[in-house]
Image (tube, rainbow, N blue to C red):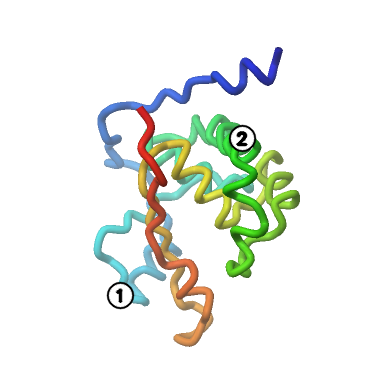
Amino acid sequence: MEIIHLRSLPLSLPSARPSFEGMASDTYAAQLLRTYAHNDTAVPLAVSADGNCFFNSLSVALTGSDDLALQLRLCCAIYVLLHTESLSDDQYTDNKLTPSLADDLKAICQEGGWSSFRAFVAAVEVVQCPIDLVYLPVNGPNDKVCGMMNKTITPSVATS
């Protein structure tokens, strides 16, 4: 009974883009963006530092607050469970930054759990909105992670 309820749990997002006016800025992120000349459209907002950084920032970007962070985490966990074939380990063998599906799912289901590339893909599909990943070369210009992480993830197919 619970599983059926959770699968049909609607994710209610506002239709208008939230205003970030008056929200606290993340000064360290702002400094890094200036240092690496990445000031174009990034808005370094401070989010709660409770281990849910990705889901907090996603919620803030969508609604202006981190109130939906846990609901977004839950929706992503359900998405991964329902799409294990397309998110399987075989599909992510080239991405060294993604742990096994089992470890990833455990982390996505755990409040405060880390988020990997697979979680980013699930979030894009859940919110049906592209996400721009920004990974600055703080480890030097030859950091291979930059090439893997600086990208835009787009939904595979828009749902109605």
Placement of the C terminus among the 4 image quadrants: top left
Q: Residue at x 41, y 60 (%)?
A: 27
Name the residue carrying label 2.
Answer: 82
Pointer 1 and pointer 2: residues touching (CB < 8 Å)?
no
Residue placed most toward the observer, 149 or 39: 149
Which sits earlier in the primary sequence, circle 1 or circle 2? 1
**Residue 93, quarter of the rendered image:** bottom right
**Residue 84, quarter of the rendered image:** top right
Q: Is residue 73 left or right of residue 99?
A: left
> 10 Å neighbourhood of mark 2: few (<14), some, or many (≥20)?
few
Q: Residue furthest top?
A: 1
Q: Residue at x 49, y 87 (%)?
A: 142
Residue 126 image point, x, y percent: 47, 36
Residue 90 image point, x, y percent: 65, 59
Placement of the N terminus among the 4 image quadrants: top right
Name the residue carrying label 1.
Answer: 37
Of the residues shown, which amino acid type is indicated by label 1? Ala
Q: Secondary structure at mark 2?
A: helix
Q: CA distance from mark 1 to mark 2?
A: 40 Å
Of the residues shown, which amino acid type is indicated by label 2? Leu
Up/down of 70 relative to 38, above or below: above
Q: Is residue 8 left or right of residue 12?
A: right
Up/down of 14 relative to 90, above or below: above
